Amino acid sequence: MSDKIEIDLEQLFDLAKIGLTEEQIAGSLGVSVSTIQRRKRDDDAFAQTLKQGKLAGIATVTNSLFEQATGDKPSTSATIFFLKNRAGWADKHEVDAMHSGVVGLDLQVESAIQALREAGIDPASL
């Protein structure tokens, strides 16, 4: 008889998909974190299920963010967040050495407007 704790892989997938940490997953399944870590290392089906669950959750959130950024009434903050994380945008902070202590913030407005237009979003609608 095996002393291996049975873990329902469908439940594991669902817990990973909703974004729980491995510590939270362990608690939900009634096992220790070391059991989760050992299973990831020793059981390919377990490791794949955990990985696929995490990826499914990320895909769900990514799709939701994309819809919020590009939908009928796009969210400005979702659009900015998406562009910063997927298109390499960044707020640019520059210090003018000639005016010590003066910090200028260049938000790359023209670049932002062009990127929105290329994504099919009318900047005037924001």
Image (spheres, helix red, strand yellow):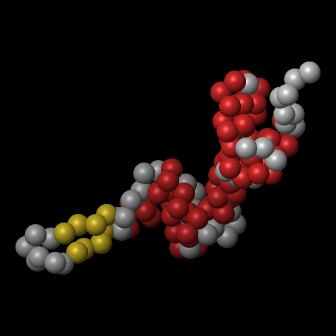
Say above or below: 125 vs 118.
Answer: below
Q: Which residue is situated farthest in the right direction here?
A: 1
Q: At which x and y percent is residue 111?
A: 38, 60
**Residue at 51%, 64% in the rendered image:** 80
Residue 109 image position (x, y, % from top left): 38, 67
In the picture provided, is 43 more to the left or to the right than 105? Answer: right
Q: Is 19 located above or below residue 51 in the figure?
A: below
- Residue lying at 65% horizontally and 27% vertically, measured from the top left: 41
| Quadrant of res 110 | bottom left
Residue that protrudes farthest toward the top in the picture: 1
Residue 58 appearing in the image = yes
Q: Position of residue 98 (x, y in %)?
A: 7, 73
User: 53 or 96: which is nearer to us?
Assistant: 53
Location of residue 77 by image quarter: bottom right
Give 109 or 85, whichever is nearer the viewer: 85
Quadrant into which the C terminus falls: bottom right
> Is residue 23 shown left or right of residue 121?
right
Q: Residue at x 67, y 70 (%)?
A: 73
Please state, as top left, top right, bottom left or bottom right, where the N terminus lies in the image: top right
x, y percent for residue 119: 55, 54
Observer-nearest residue: 38 or 89?
Answer: 38
